[in-house]
């Protein structure tokens, strides 16, 4: 018989289960089981693009990437757990085959690194911070004009 997981390892396993369930038919059940009722999700990177597209009928962050990259595959590269937090690094790959914040599909294969930091109270996941390389995706799909329009001085 194996020893029970420590709280830290249990929280690390919960974050892995969450990531592995995303985009599957088990996602809703996993979210109900793993996230606190008052779970807070904070997103940087792609959230700025979402804010610019607000009111244009795009789904919330997360769902928009699945629609824009329907063959999306996430590969977990690393996890780190310490005190009340678990860090996760993963790589998303997929084909830009759907609308991405008003940018029509290009058919280009893309790759993006993303990080998440989960905060727990005991074994309850209460908060998640996520940061994706939104600029990298825009560069890969040839959307430099969008970066320039957002005031990126390096492109002027």
Image: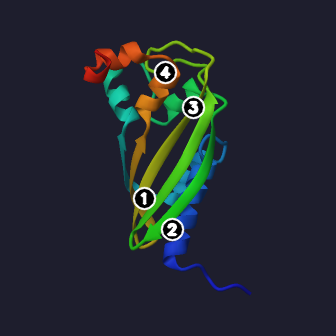
Find out whether the residues at labels 1 and 3 contact each other: C-beta distance under 8 Å: no
In percent of the image, x 57 and y 51: which residue is there? 19
* Measured Cα–Cα span from mark 4 to mark 1: 26 Å
Describe the element under mark 2 as helix, strand or loop: helix
Q: Earlier in the sequence, mark 2 or mark 3?
A: 2
Q: Residues within 10 Å of mark 2 (few under 14, many from 20)?
A: many
Q: Which mark is residue 135?
A: none
Find out whether the residues at labels 2 and 1 contact each other: C-beta distance under 8 Å: yes
Describe the element under mark 4 as helix, strand or loop: loop
Describe the element under mark 1 as helix, strand or loop: strand
Q: Earlier in the sequence, mark 2 or mark 1?
A: 2
Q: Earlier in the sequence, mark 3 or mark 4?
A: 3
Q: Residues within 10 Å of mark 4 (few under 14, many from 20)?
A: many
Question: Which quadrant is the C terminus positioned in?
Answer: top left
Q: Position of residue 30 (x, y in %)?
A: 58, 53
Q: Position of residue 123 (x, y in %)?
A: 46, 70
Question: Which quadrant is the N terminus positioned in?
Answer: bottom right
* Measured Cα–Cα span from mark 4 to mark 2: 32 Å
In percent of the image, x 57 and y 15: which residue is there? 105
Quarter of the figure with residue 124: bottom left
Q: Which residue is mark 2?
A: 11
**Visible in this render: residue 60?**
no
Q: Which mark is residue 118?
A: 1
Mark nearer the viewer, 4 or 2:
4
* Measured Cα–Cα span from mark 1 to mark 3: 21 Å
Q: Which residue is mark 4?
A: 100
Q: Position of residue 13 (x, y in %)?
A: 58, 65
Q: Is residue 79 above or below residue 10?
A: above
Q: Position of residue 57 (x, y in %)?
A: 42, 19
Q: Which mark is residue 66?
A: 3
**Residue positioned most to the right:** 1
Find out whether the residues at labels 3 and 4 contact each other: C-beta distance under 8 Å: no
């Amino acid at each position: 018989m194996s020893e029970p997981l420590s709280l830290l390892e249990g929280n690390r396993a919960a974050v892995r289960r969450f990531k592995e369930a995303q985009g599957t038919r088990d996602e809703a059940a996993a979210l109900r089981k793993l996230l606190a009722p008052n779970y807070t999700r904070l997103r940087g990177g792609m959230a700025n693009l979402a804010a610019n597209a607000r009111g244009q009928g795009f789904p919330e962050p997360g769902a928009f990437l699945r629609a824009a990259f329907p063959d999306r595959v996430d590969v977990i590269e690393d996890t780190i757990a310490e005190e009340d937090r678990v860090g996760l690094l993963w790589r998303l790959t997929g084909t830009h085959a759907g609308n991405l914040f008003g940018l029509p599909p290009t058919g280009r294969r893309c790759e993006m690194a993303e990080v998440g930091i989960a905060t727990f109270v005991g074994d309850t996941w209460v908060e998640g911070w996520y940061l994706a390389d939104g600029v990298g995706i825009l560069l890969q799909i040839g959307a430099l004009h969008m970066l320039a329009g957002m005031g990126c001085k390096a492109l002027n």
